[in-house]
Amino acid sequence: MPVTKASLYEHPLRVIYHFLKIDTPLFAALLVLSLAGLVVLYSASGGDMDAVHRQMIRLSLGFLGLLALAQISSDQLRSWSVWLYALGVLLLLAVMFFGDTGKGAQRWLDVGLLRFQPSELMKIWLPMMMAWYYAKHPLPPSLKDIFVGFAIIAVPAALIIKQPDLGTAILVIGAGLFVIFLAGIRFRVLAVFAGLVMAAAPALWFYLRDYQRGRILTLLNPERDPLGAGYHIIQSKIAIGSGGLYGRGWLNGTQSQLDFIPERSTDFIFSVISEEFGFFGTSLLIVAYMFIVVRGLVISARAQSCYARLLGGAISLSFFSYVFVNIGMVTGLLPVVGVPLPLISYGGTSMVTLLTMFGILMSIQSHRKLLGH
Amino acid sequence: MARREALKNLRLEFLLYRERAIISGILVAITFLVLLTRLYDLQITNHAHYQTRSQENHVRIVPVAPTRGLIFDRNGVLLADNTPNYQLVITPGQVKDMTRLLVDLQELVDIEEHELERFYKTIKRKQSFQKTPIKFNLSDEEVARFAVNQYKFGGVEIEANSTRSYPLKNFTAHALGYVGRINEKEQLEVDRQNYNGTTHIGKLGIEKYYEDLLHGKVGYQHEEINAQGRKQRELNKNPPVPGVDIQLSLVAELQEVALNALGEESGAVVAMDPNNGEILVFVSNPNYDPNDFVNGIGQKAYSELRDSETRPLFNRALIGQYPPGSTIKPIVALAGLQYDVTCPTKTMYAGPYFQLPGKSRRYRDWKKGGHGLVNMDSAIAQSCDVYFYDLGNRLGIDRMHEFLGKFGLGNLTQLDTVGEARGILPSPEWKKRARGEVWFPGETVITSIGQGYMLATPLQLALMTAKIAKRGSTFQPRFVRATRVPGELSFTEIEPSPLPTVPLRDDDYWDVIHQSMINVVHAPNGTARKIGLDAQYKIAGKTGTAQVFGIGQDEEYDAEKIAKKLRDHALFVAYAPAENPSIAIAVVVENGGSGSSTAAPVARTVLDAYLLKDNIVASH
């Protein structure tokens, strides 16, 4: 499929997309979802137009990052992988020593103009490192390579848990494990590891902090402390449940508008959507997320290099994991961990990193070599 | 590098990846399905449940207490008002550490021990989101001090509302009674719904008797609240219906006149209009300021009042029971005429004492040497005891009991207030019932001058006098003469209800008694002649002296020698103007000695104020 010839007869918009090196369906889905997110944010912030403006600026930055990354070929990225990983670990160490404290955890790093969370960056730099490593070795990975992979995951994960930021740590660990899974770890080996984790789970309990244990207990029975730990989840469920089929309408959710939902414009924004747009709105949202994940997997499967495949797949599954952890949390299926709803929650670093991640997927899609498949 | 690359089987890896991607896709789809199922469960299956909980979350139904009806005197003077009041309220559900909060709060606002106690008691039976007052009657300074520091006290607010106040303070205390905070016992008795927003209830007197009328009907305000329980906006409102305003027949000015006339003396004055039963004066001395009780009187102040020797809390007009003494003599005389035991012109020699035939006991007259030759008229005017000992003895206790009963003695007057005492009108049956003893003839003798077992309240004496004044037919005594339903401009008067009349064989007997009672005040030898000397109208009255301290057979009663608290009670009953009575009055001065010296002047002062002062009564 000679691209020059084809493009001559194609629709002018397609030419632009091609020039920008983006994947049209994925880009459209991301754009629609983030714009819908702005509408929801307006309601969730109680009509705070300033918040919407700030979010628009972040979105613009994110999409610029996306476009920028889309121009860089995955071969290029691969050559940076090790350095970025090393930089990430250094930044995490820096956070440990010089970081700002917010809400009892040391997560932020202030570098002049920018104030950001290095752990966020690790969400993408870790799978890059993992993909780099497994692309170099024959797949399915040997037991030794699996352990090396574990080691690569363990270093940043340990630093993030120490902050403490269990939510992000889980997502980072997840991103790394997705690479191992996609690299083709044998199911027998996978089963053994899964069995080991299960067996070790009770022991892990003792390593959790009190508040973390509390969150798990609260998940099992939110009414155990309805005004304390259980409050978030009870109020969130009330909001979701009272939404019904079509919801109470934009700006009309009483749970949302009257402050009953805590963190309603950030981690619990899904409750606002549920209350105001009902099951209709939430199903639509989940379908949109599903579309993005599947599109990402398709792009990765079509990629020509092993590195691009693994990275693309890991990005898609990471994105899925963010969605699942967040919605699972607000619906009371998972314990409360601070994970934003991708593309919709109000917040800086995560929005930008997420969109740059999709930039990589775009690049994988558009930098396919013309020959072969 | 190249060697290792060579080891990779690119085609195989590509297929392996595709397999993993497809498996991932399926797992992702399954997980999303789980989420959708969960959402379906919450949003569709259990929608109704969460809908209700959401509603309960954000809509609060706040009861709005009705405005209590006002109480006026007959001339429109406000006796019970609702005045603005600032109170400090706490929503316990919004307070994390109550003990610390209260300690901090005490630095700004002076909170007494009993207020703390009451607060803790109240929050126990209320729900945690309900506001509970901790301090009433904040001063302007306290309001300002708190307002500045309010941000430090989550869950604490200042609320402006109205509180009951009694502008005339002591002067109306025993008539009006007062309202106070609803206590636990009352909480169980009242209509829970109607009293949902009400904090105060009538505790005593008119405030208690007319509680239902004065209270009104509760209203409701639906409020939208946020998660902190703060009101966002008012939804629909169902306004309360204010209580009914009532107009008393009392004359505020006369209350003052009567109390001032009593001065330092303990006692009571009750006056009523015999033409319609309206109570004009109702005072008991000493008394108290009912305003102190509205928001809870402190323990110390309360015990001071309670333990005071002069008993200011004791309502002498309503529950003070005194031997009526000679004030009943006109009625005993009437009984003598009615039962044909004597006639007005019959004279007898009244010596210093009376003896029952064949008995040695001497029943003394108050006058040392006796009154000499007396008839009915002079016996009443001079209050000759011996005449009435003789008359009573001939009447017998049963007939006296029956006839005195017709004037209301021994019966509740049914005045529209609470806690009235019944007094005692003795009879052989009563003695058997109450004491398990037989009646002695000597007891009949002393009953005829209102001593012995007989007891009456000042209110009963006033009613008795009204009956005499109106030739046996007067009206049910009452405080409330008119009511005004909310929304109406003028008061609607309540028809007086007549009491059963006292039928006499001959209606002229009334004139005989009336003339004798006029002579008590206006004849040269009348016992109350001092008050009649310069009176501009004719007064018909009767003095009385009630024994407190029994003296021995041969002892002399010497006021000087007897401690003040054992001295006789002084009584005086009267009506005026004698020809066309418009007021009947009873005065009791505790330990005042003789009726003529202390009680009668008080009565005269009140009568003067009522009858001579222009415009003291609008409808007079």
Image: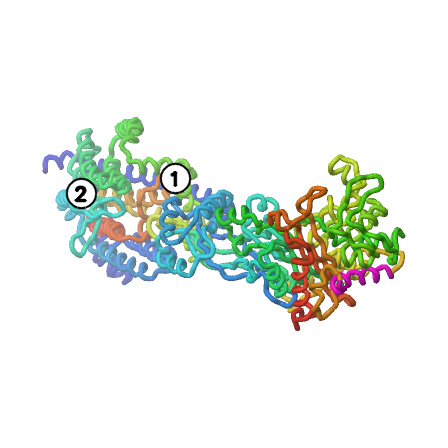
Q: Is residue B476 left or right of residue A184?
A: right
> Which SS class for mark 1?
loop
Q: Which mark is residue B246?
A: none
Q: Chain of mark 1?
A: A
Q: Nearer the viewer, residue B298 or A337?
A: B298
Query: Which residue does the numbered mark 1 point to in the structure image?
Result: A333
Q: Can the viewer see residue B242 in this picture?
A: no
Q: Is residue B336 left or right of residue A356?
A: right
Q: Do tag 2 and tag 1 residues touch (Cβ < 8 Å)?
A: no
Magenta-drawn segment: B508-524
Q: Determine whether B84 is above or below A347 in the image.
A: below
Q: Residue at x 71, y 71 (%)?
A: B536
Q: Nearer the viewer, residue B571 or A141?
A: B571
What's the distance in space between the residues labelled 2 and 1, CA to CA?
32 Å
Q: Is residue B47 left or right of residue A360?
A: right
Q: Chain of mark 2?
A: A
Disc 2 crowd rating (10 Å Cα; few below 14, some 14-19, many 20+) is some
Q: Nearer the viewer, residue B141 or A219?
A: B141
Q: Can the viewer see residue A54 in this picture?
A: yes
Question: Quarter of the image containing the C terminus of chain B?
Answer: bottom right
Q: Does label 2 or label 1 sit earlier along the sequence?
A: 2
Q: Residue at x 55, y 49 (%)?
A: B182
Question: Label 2 amino acid?
Answer: Met
Answer whether residue B516 is magenta in the image.
Answer: yes
Q: Main secondary structure of the magenta part?
A: helix
